[in-house]
Image: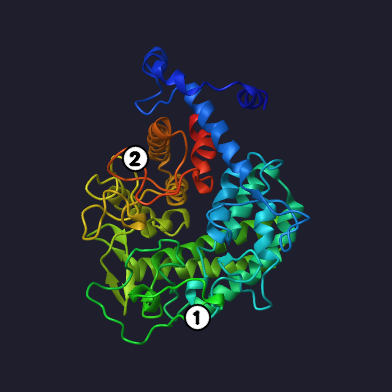
Amino acid sequence: MQSRRKFLTQVTIGTAGYALMPLLAKAAVAKDKWDVPVALQKEMYQAALRIARKNIRGGPNDPVFKKPYLDAAFNGNIFLWDTCFMACYAKYHPGELPAANALDNFYSRQEPDGFICREYRRDGKAMWPKEHPVSINPPLFGFAELQLYSQSKDVARLKQVYPHLKKFFDFLVKTYRMGDHLFFSDALGSGMDNIPRYPEGWKDDGKGLAIKNTPGHTYAYSGLNSVWNKQGRSVDMTAQMALFADNLIEIAGVTGQQADITAYRKFHTETKEALNKHCWNEEDGFYYDLGYGKQVKRMHIGGFWTMIAGVVPKERVDRLVKTLTDPKKFWRKFPVPSYAADQKGYSSKGEYWLGGVWTPTNYMLIKGLQRVNKNELAKEFARKYYWCVAQVYIKTKTFWEDYAPDSLTTGVPAKPNFCGWTAVVPISIYHEFIE
């Protein structure tokens, strides 16, 4: 703790100091080729904190959200999976970055049947209709709460939120789990907005859940992705639900809810078996989405949620990791793109989820590699990613929503000053792999 306080109070270097960076780098004893000078590490950390502090909203004068909360500041709305990943860095600064209050904003809007929308407007109303899976983001509340707990050890907090998590889990199982024990979802709701999830050449068959008017007609969501849902199965949503069950097992154990654990374990086992039976492709070394019971041969980063979810059998780990580290697919200059580079539609500029490099999925991958005991690869990946973000920071003096996979540049498009989940890099990855 003493070294951390010293780190946080030291004065950072100014822009002009980067003329000395090559000399500083050579003078330092490099840990590896991805070593970032200490002065730059400190500046990035302080810059991320500064941006994040500016993103604190709410409070007694707010008409809806009465406690100050950390926000992604993407627009005026609050977003579920953004908030969950912000907890991954706010856990190191709970006194000044109120991520717990941000999570509570969602729990406070939970409906009696357990539904929580992925996005709420400033008036507190759900942005998306409950009847369509576009309203559901990656269900990561349990993951976020355990991130906070890893630093706070606040059992009372877990006891407080557990009923909300359990009700939300039950709602998702009841609403989106199919007879094959896999889940369907929506492309935009999945967080990977513009990845085509349907089979090549597919046309609307009228069998999906069609989106109705959104509240206030504030957003138009149309196209094939909006009507591709019940016809398919989402590998990422299914794996995320396995992770949710795994998180609930841990939380139930900590909070004395042992009676619930058996059901969660059964769910996890069934989901693991279903993913490996239906979604795994041995020849390609990857977990695919399904369409009408057949694998949709599109490699997107969602297939890697299986690692952190604990559903990849030991004998398949090396094959999946080989796909991840293939430079023709995912192991690019700026790792890891959201869409494999050797397939139709990939963009070297990013174009959001057609190749963009995103902090939430990269952090998921790092944690997933640790879970499957690929610790050295996790460290190498984390350090390389940190170094790449640092190179763009040197050029732009800020952090970005996403990055381009084949050059050390921002994604196209990408929001600047995004902390937001990108603060995971200068804060969480720093503490966990660089410090």
The reply, left or right, for residue 34 in relation to residue 322 is: right
Q: From what the image shows, is residue 102 above or below residue 137?
A: above
Q: Give the amino acid at mark 1.
A: Asn
Relative depth, front residue between 250 and 1: 1
Q: From what the image shows, is residue 137 above or below residue 172?
A: above
Judging by the rendered image, the residue that carries numbered circle 2 is: 409
Q: Give the amino acid at mark 2.
A: Thr
Secondary structure under badge 1? loop
Secondary structure under badge 2? loop
The reply, left or right, for residue 148 in relation to residue 375 is: right
Q: Position of residue 305 (x, y in %)?
A: 43, 57
Q: Position of residue 173 (x, y in %)?
A: 54, 75
Q: From what the image shows, is residue 260 above or below residue 60?
A: below
Colour mode of the rendering = rainbow
Whether residue 435 is visible, yes or no, is no
Q: Earlier in the sequence, mark 1 or mark 2?
A: 1
Spatial CA distance of label 1 from label 2 is: 37 Å
Picture residue at 24% right of the left edge, 52% below the top: 341
Q: Quadrant of residue 338?
A: bottom left
Q: From what the image shows, is residue 124 above or below residue 18?
A: below
Q: Quadrant of the N terminus?
A: top right
Picture residue at 61% right of the left edge, 52% below the top: 71
Picture residue at 59% right of the left edge, 53% below the top: 144
The reply, left or right, for residue 247 in relation to residue 398 is: right
Judging by the rendered image, the residue that carries numbered circle 1 is: 213
Relative depth, front residue between 162 and 355: 355
